[in-house]
Amino acid sequence: MKTDEKISVQPEDTRESVTFGSDRNKDFSKEPLCLSGKGVTRVFHTGKTTTVAVDHVNFEFHKGELISIVGESGSGKTTLSKILLGLLEPTEGEIFFKGQPRDISTGAKKKEYWKGIQAIFQDPFSSYNVFHKIDAVLLDCINMRGGKNLPKEKKIEMMTEACSFVNLKFAELTNKYPFELSGGQMQRLMIARIFLLKPDILLADEPTSMIDACSRATILDMLLNLRNETGMTVIFITHDIGLAYYISDSVYIMEHGKFVESGRPDEVMLTPKAPYTKRLISDVPKIHEPWDLSTVEIK
Amino acid sequence: MKHTLKNVFHSPRFLVGFIIFMTILLTVLIYPYFVTRDPLQGLGKGFLSPGTYVSVYDANNTGTYRVELPEADDNRLESSLPVKDRQTMLDYLKAMGADVTGLDTSNENFHQLIEVWKANYSDADAKAKKYEGFSTQAKRNELRRLNNRLSTDVSVPMSVTKGEGDSATVSTVATSDYVKVTEVANAITLPLGTDNFGRDTLTELVKATGISLLVGLLAGSIATSLGLLIGLLAGYIGGVVDDILMFICNIFTVIPGFVLLILIYSALGTNSRSITTCAIIIGITSWVWTARSVRSQVISLRNRDHVNLSKLSGHSLGRIVLTDILPYIASYVVMAFILQVSSGILAEAQLSMLGLGPNPNELPTLGLMMNWSKLFGAYTSSNAWWAYFPVILVIALISFSLNLMNTGLDQVFNPTLRD
């Protein structure tokens, strides 16, 4: 495998076009509910130990909103994201999808639900089946959206459009395997996948944590563009409260499986109430200021 | 795929194993086209050592050529008097007190030895004096026969009767008359001699290798498919299905496989044990560890992001298992299959050796050949190494080559083992 031979695409560093921050004045509470939950709980039993990963959480995500769920490792973010995606069943509580109780009891119903919610995972390197070519990954999305019988030219046109949305050239990617791309390119391809699928909700589980800082800005920019263009709800799961502040419309702070604080980013970040939020904020290093480590808990 | 295959064939271990295995396999496949004899047909009685056997009858009726080998007479004498007999002669001469200085069993002193012998030996003398070491009747008879053989002059032409009845003609065969082996109507080369039934060991061995490989392949396929299916189901579905399947696995684990095999085999009776039955039984008693390891691999794979993404793409359980899980464990399954084939062949050999193998009247297997060698004393009384040693060698080579291929694959697929 020639790992050093990366595909030449347009430069990843397109920070000039990045417009961090969202439309802070927009009140999303007037938008229709996209996904909400009441008393959602998930308990794991391992031998004699019982772990409550998600503990009676309530949430309301509106259409077109960009929500950040912030918490440190082990706070239950990933478990919650799996519950939201329908990959894990909650032990207790109810989830509503577009105002209706979510029903994913059969394979067909699950399939229908997954047309409405899709995900981008943390590790782009393990997100792809290494035996499938990039074409197959994208074609799969077109087929899922009911484009199975479209003419070949139309499919190629759609794939080319999706790739150019994320600054990739489809002609250069065709017949290549995902592992022949760099991490940033793979994650952009994931966004291209979402572009083709056009779900109502996108759940991005730490999509930038495995990527270098320059590519990170590009990925975030693309996610925001995608949201603005399609009006989809984006649930952004991160451990980086600084990042959450810049991009979200609302923030949920998660500690030990519970939402300890939620609200607009300005409220939560500038006037934090919960001690955990205060700690998270103080843990963010600030340029031009000495880093205050006094609040860091050493376990 | 191409890249993986290239890597696999770059592994020296795999390559050596592959070459040995393919040589054995090709021999098994090609040999029957050259030797069409029935491998179970008896050619004679009992063990014949390896060599070329020429029909004396047909040699007489074959056109002769005149060949004059300078050392022909010497060879003839030497052949008529083996070293063992020469030693007996020396011993007798020493016992009767004759002068044996300068005499030994070598070819140079051959004529001298015969002269001294002729000067000293007489039947009456041997009978009367009863020299030490030659006091028994049997010993004296041996001496008499030896003496009679010496008194025939080997350089005299031999008369031979050709044909039968009225048309019979008597002709003489000169010492310089030779026949060409390929012109003799009936001559057979037995590179590995014959076994106790007088069967050509090589032909039988090739057939037996083929059958044993078939048993191994069938048993290996059954064990691997069963193990794979159970492992995939238990690992991917999990929950109660996993618990039940693992319970069955545990039961099979605690019962020693070989004991189970022996019990099933002896319960079946010889006549109902066909080759296929044997392979199936070996297969269904040896899937356990494949199932266990496949299960553990699937458990680690089922929560990977690419599997989750495949689920989110609405793929069915079958498709996820076939395209997102199976390819990831394919290398492992191939390795398990190779080991299962090897252990299948060994299991068959062990059972047959104990007399519990397939029906011996149908086809030979490597284990049955070992069993026959044991029963008919090939490695005790008959000292017929050719009846069992090649069998051991083939079993060892097959097992060795398969294990070598497995280690080679392990080296390719398991990065921590790479040099």
Image (cartoon, coloured by chain):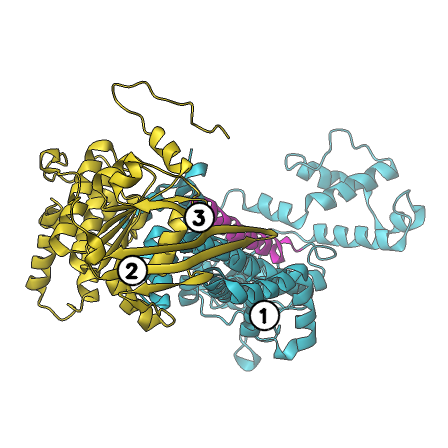
- Tag 1: Cα neighbours inside 10 Å, few (<14), some, or many (≥20)? some
Residue under disc 2 on the same chain as residue under disc 3:
yes
Which residue, given by chain and number where applicable, does mark 1 sit on? B281
Q: Are marks 1 and 3 in contact (CB under 8 Å)?
A: no
Answer yes or no: is residue A87 visible: no
The amino acid on which the numbered mark 2 sits, given as a three-letter code, is Leu
Name the mark on residue B359.
Answer: none
Q: Residue at x 61, y 64 (%)?
A: B247
Give the CA separation, mark 1 to mark 2. 56 Å
Q: Is residue A203 above or below residue B236?
A: above
B391 in the magenta segment? yes
Q: Are marks 1 and 2 in contact (CB under 8 Å)?
A: no
The image position of residue B218, as x and y in percent, is 49, 67
The amino acid on which the numbered mark 1 sits, given as a three-letter code, is Ile
Extent of the magenta region: B384-408
Question: Of residues B361 and B95, which is closer to you in this image?
Answer: B361
